[in-house]
Image (tube, coloured by chain):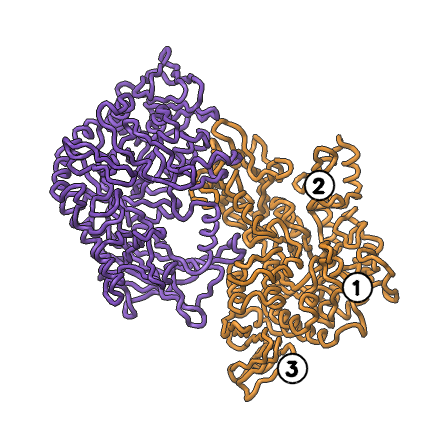
Chain colours: A orange, B purple
Amino acid sequence: MTIPADGIAPGDDTSGLASVTADFIFGTLATDDQRLNNLRDRARGLHHDGHITPRDPAPGQAVEVHVTVGVDTSIGALAVAWTTNGSEPDETAPSSPLFPVETSWDMLLWGYVTRWTGELPAQPGSTLVRYRFVAESPNGELITVDPDPFTGNPARFAYAVDDERVPEWVREAVIYHIFVDRFAPDPGEDWQHTTSLDGFYGGTLRGITAHLPYLVDLGVTCLWLSPVFPSPSHHGYDATDYFAIEPRLGTENDLRDLIAEAHDHGLRVLLDFVANHASNEHPIFTHARDHPASPEREWFTFLDGGTYRSFFGVGTMPQINTDHPAARDYLLDAARYWLDAGVDGFRLDYANGPSHAFWAAFRQETRAANPDSLTIGEVVESAELKASYLGRLDGTLDFLLLQQLRAFFAFDLIDPAAFHRFLERHLAYFPADFTLPSFLDNHDMNRFLWVVGGDKRRLKLAALLQFSLPHSPVIYYGTEVGLSQRHDLEYPDGSRRMEESRLPMRWGADQDKDLHTFYRRLIALRRAHPTIWQAARRPLILDESGLYVVEIGDAAILALNRSDAEVSTRVPTGLALALPTDPADVRDGTSLVLPPSTGAVLMAPGLGR
Amino acid sequence: MTIPADGIAPGDDTSGLASVTADFIFGTLATDDQRLNNLRDRARGLHHDGHITPRDPAPGQAVEVHVTVGVDTSIGALAVAWTTNGSEPDETAPSSPLFPVETSWDMLLWGYVTRWTGELPAQPGSTLVRYRFVAESPNGELITVDPDPFTGNPARFAYAVDDERVPEWVREAVIYHIFVDRFAPDPGEDWQHTTSLDGFYGGTLRGITAHLPYLVDLGVTCLWLSPVFPSPSHHGYDATDYFAIEPRLGTENDLRDLIAEAHDHGLRVLLDFVANHASNEHPIFTHARDHPASPEREWFTFLDGGTYRSFFGVGTMPQINTDHPAARDYLLDAARYWLDAGVDGFRLDYANGPSHAFWAAFRQETRAANPDSLTIGEVVESAELKASYLGRLDGTLDFLLLQQLRAFFAFDLIDPAAFHRFLERHLAYFPADFTLPSFLDNHDMNRFLWVVGGDKRRLKLAALLQFSLPHSPVIYYGTEVGLSQRHDLEYPDGSRRMEESRLPMRWGADQDKDLHTFYRRLIALRRAHPTIWQAARRPLILDESGLYVVEIGDAAILALNRSDAEVSTRVPTGLALALPTDPADVRDGTSLVLPPSTGAVLMAPGLGR
C-alpha cells in the first residue's frame, strides 16, 4: 500500500515511501486514486454498508438503519423489510419506511447527499435479524442498495441481537502465528528438499505438537495456524474440503492431539478460515462449473464467457457466495465442526469479502458452539470499515498500526509526535469491545527484520512498543529467533514473491539466542505486569531526533531512542530497568542512558499484577 | 467554474462543459483539484472556520465552539478566551478548555482527525462575543487556528447574540440589479461615446430616478445599485472614499432623491458594499503605502518586496484588514452613514473575504441603525461555507442554484430528475432563516440570453422556474428586454472581458416588448399569488426527454418542456393557464399542449393570495 506523504508526515519527501509500498499486500484502498474513487463512489447511488445504530444491538434495543442517497440518485420510495426467523425477507415480510434526515454537501461531486434513516423494532437476545431495502426511483423503477459490483445483485444484510463481548482470554493473549508447512517437520524428520519457494517444506501438525515445549517456554498463550484443510498449495488458502486435514500436514487426530496438548499447557488454538473463496479444485466448484443447471451453481458467481468471480482475479480461488443459504450453511457447519474438535476460534481470511450479514450469522453460530470462541478478521482497509465489524466480529488484525509501526521503527518516515498522535487517536477511535491484535509482519509482506537490514535493535524497539499496547500482540513464527529472508519479496524484475517471507523456521543453533531471550523476557513482562498495557499513557518526550518517552500509569516508563546517537533522559527516581532492548544504564538513579536504537521499560520495583 | 460531470449528471460527456466553464467567475473551488486540496487542507492543522453550535445563538443559549485538529497536528493544550465588551480577548480574558469529543478517519490523508469542543457561556441579547483560541503543541509551542494564508496571523472570531431574523419584506421582494454606469444617463442626455468597454457610458443616479416609473411598471420591489462611491473604474468595486458619491454618477443628494422617490413607490434600495478591498488610490491606502510607520499601515497587509495583499492579486484592489479595529470602524461607520441616508441594506461583495467576526459586527451595527435593513453576501463557494454565514448575514446570493439553472435550461447538461433532486435538497439544506436570492446572470458572466444563442424561449422557461421558487428573484438589468452581448466574454485568444455582459440598457423601441410583457406578467403573478413560491412542491413528471411537471400546493401546476418537440401532458381539470411562456393550449380542459422550449403555470381560477 502506498502511504501518502501527507498521511504520514506532511512535507516529507515521498521518494522513500517506495520501500514501504513494496512491503504490503493491501486491498482496494492502496493508492491515492483508489481512495479518491472510494469517496466519490460513496457519494453516488444508494449505500448502506451495514451502517446501523447502535452498531452492536443488545436485546431490547431498537435499531436505526441508514442509507446514503447519492448526488446522482432520486428516491420515490425507500423502505426496509425484515425477518427474525433466519429467512431472507420477501414481499410478505414486515417493512418500515425510511425518511430523509440529513442533507450534506459533497465537495468532491459538488452536490448534495442525503442520509435516510428507518427503524427496526427491538428484539430479544439471540435473534438474527435479516433485512433488505426496497428502493424505487420516482418513476417506480427498483434501485439496488449496495449492488454487487460484478453482478449488480443486492447485498444481504443482517445483524445479531445479543450480549456477546470479546472473550476475556483474548485481552491477555500473546498470539503466535504459525505457517504450518514452514514451522516444523514430524519429530525426527528433516525439512523436505524443495527447489521452489512455493513447494512443500514438510512442516506438520505433529511437528508443532513436538515443539509445544518451545512455545510454552517462549511464553505465548495462543497459536494461530495457517490453513490446515486439504489444498493443492503450500499456503492452504484455497481449500478443497472444509471438513478434513491436508494429509501432508497430518490427520484430524493429529490436530485433536495438538489442541489437547496445547490446552493442557494453557495455550489456545486458532484456525485460519477462508470463507471468501475455495480452491477451483473443490468438488463443489468443479461440479458447479461442469453442471450449469446444478443448484451448486449458485454457490459461486459464473460470468459470461465461462469465467467466474474469484479472489482478486486469481482463477484458482473462486469466490464463494457466502450469502447463498447452502454455501453459508456449509461454511457454518465447517466452523462448528472444528469448534467441536476443540479449536478456540478463527482468524478469518479476507473478512471484508463476505458480507456483514454473513459474519453476523457466523459469530452467532460459532458462539453458540463455543461461548468462549474468537473471531478475528483480516480487514485491510480504512479504520471506518474496520469499525463497521463491531458486533459482527470480535475484532480485526491491526494493519493500520502495522503501517505506522513500520513507518516509525523501520523507515523513519514519521517522528515520535506523529507516531504518538496516531496511537492516541487510533486507540480512541475503536470501541472498547473490539480487539485489534498487533503485529510487525506476516506471511504477505517482507519480514520486519528484513526491511531494517537485519538491524535487530530496531526489531526489539518495535516489539517493545508493540508489547506495551492494549491489544494482543501477534508474533510471526521465527521473528523471535532472527528468521529473515534471502531476497526482498519484490524482485528486480518487478514481480513479487510473498514466499520470501515464509522460509523454514530456524531451530537449535540456527536461532538467534539474544533475540530469543529478549522475546521471552518481553512476553514474561507483559504477562506479569498487565499495568504496562492497561494503564493510561501520557507522553513525556516527543523529540524530533527520535527520543520517545511515555509514562504508563504512575509507576512505569517506556523510553525509546530511535536515533543514531546515544541519548540520556531524566527519569523519576525509584524506577528501575525492567527490560532494556539492549544493555542500558540508569545513572545516579535519575538519568537513563540509551545507546542508539535502543529502548527500555522502567518500573517501580514493587509493581506487579 | 468547472462543473464536474459527476456532480451534474454522472456518465455525461464532459466535453460540453467547457461552455459553462467560460461563463463563471468563481472562487477558490473552481476545479476538481482545488476542491480536493480544500478537503486535504481541512484535514491538516487547526480549523475553526467560525463553526459554533448553535450557528445563530439566541439570548440565553450557551454556545459550543469546535476546532478540527488535523492528521498532522498534536495538541498539548487548547482553550478559548472571550470578551463581551467588544475588545479582542487578551491574556486577562476568561477562558474555557476544549476537549476531544470525536475522532474520525480521513480517507484522503489516511489518518485520524479529531474534533475538539468547548463551551462559551450564555449571554443576554445584543451581545457581541469576541473569542480566540489558545492552542499549544505538546512541547508548549503556540499553534494558530485558521492562520491567514498570507501572514500566518490568527483569524479573529465573533458572534452576535440576538433574535434578529431575515427582514420580512425580503421574502416578498423582487430585486432589480442595476449596473449604474450602464443603466440610464441623466434625463435628456444620451449615452457618452466611448470606444472602450471599460470606459464610462454615462449612466447616473438621476437616470435611475427618471426611470423609476419604468421599474414600478415592471413590478420590481427592490433596487440593487452597483457601487456608487468614488472610484476610478467603470464598475466601482474599488472605492477611493466610502462616504461620498462618485461625481460621474451624481451627488449624495441625487442618491437621497432616488431613495426618497423609490420609497414613495414602495421600492427598497440596496447599495453594493465592498468591505473586502478598496482602490489603491484610496487616500488611506496611499498614506499607508507611503508611510510604513503610520497606524494606517495596519489597515492593509504589506508584504516583503513592496507588494501587498490584494483581491485575487489585482493590484488596484488592496485587501482591507477588516478585523483591524480602525479599518473595521471605518467600514461600519460608512454602512451606518448610508443607512442613515435611507438605504435599505447592502449587497456585500466577496463576502467570504472578510471574517465571520467582521460580519457578526456588521449585521449587529447595521440592524441597530435600521432594524429592517438587509445584508446579502456574495459567497461563491460550497453550500457548507454559505450556510456558515447564518447569524452573520441574512443570506447569500445563490450561485449554486445559478449553476444548476444554467446547466438545466441553457446547457441541457442535466435532466429534470437531476434538476429537481438538486432543488429539493438545496432548499432542505439551508435553515429557514437564511435567504438565497436567485438569479440567471449578473455582471461577471455571460448573460443567460447570450449563452442560449438568443433563444428567448429558454430564458422565459428559466425565469418561470426561477420565479416559482421560495427565495427572492433578482433580475439583472436588461434581461427583461432582451439585452444580450456582442461577443462571448471569453475571447478567442483566451482572455476574458466581463464587460461584454455590461452593455448599456436598451430603452424605447430597442426593447423586446414580448419579453418585457412576459416579465411584467411573471412578476405580477409572483406578487399576486405567493402560494406559487410558498407552497410545497411535488414532482409529477420528471421525464428524460425534458418534460418537467411539478404540483405546487394543491391548486397550481408548473409545467416545463425543455425538449425540441411539442409535448402534451394531462393536467387536473379545473386548472387554467395562469402564465404560459409562449402561447400554449389546454385542450378539453385536461391536456396541456406545450410547444418546444415552452412552459406554463396553471392555477385554479379562484386561487389568490
Spot occupied by residue A412 in the image (x, y as percentages of width and height): 59, 67
**Secondary element type, mark 3:** loop
Spot occupied by residue A478 in the image (x, y as percentages of width and height): 74, 67
- Image side of residue B164 versus residue A218, left or right: left
Q: Residue under circle 3?
A: A583
Residue extending farthest to the bottom is: A588
Mark closer to the chain start, 1 or 2: 2
Q: Residue under circle 2?
A: A327
Query: Which image quadrant for residue A223?
Result: bottom right
Mark closer to the chain start, 3 or 2: 2
Instruction: Confirm whether residue B20 shows in the render.
Output: yes
Image quadrant occupied by the N terminus of chain B = top left
Image quadrant occupied by the C terminus of chain B = top left
**Secondary element type, mark 1:** loop
Rendered position, A542 above or below A107:
below
**Chain name for mark 3:** A
**Chain name for mark 2:** A
Amino acid type shown at disc 2: Ala
Residue neighbourhood size for the residue with mark 3, other residues' Cα within 10 Å, grouped as few (<14), some (14–19), many (≥20): few
Residue at mark 1 to residue at mark 2: CA–CA distance: 35 Å
What residue is drawn where x is 33% and y is 27%?
A: B464
The mark closer to the camera, 1 or 2, is 1
Relative depth, front residue between A27 and B493: B493
Relative depth, front residue between B418 and B165: B418
Amino acid type shown at disc 3: Pro
Amino acid type shown at disc 1: Pro
Q: Residue under circle 1?
A: A504
Q: Are marks 3 and 1 on the same chain?
A: yes
Residue at mark 3 to residue at mark 1: CA–CA distance: 30 Å
**Chain name for mark 1:** A
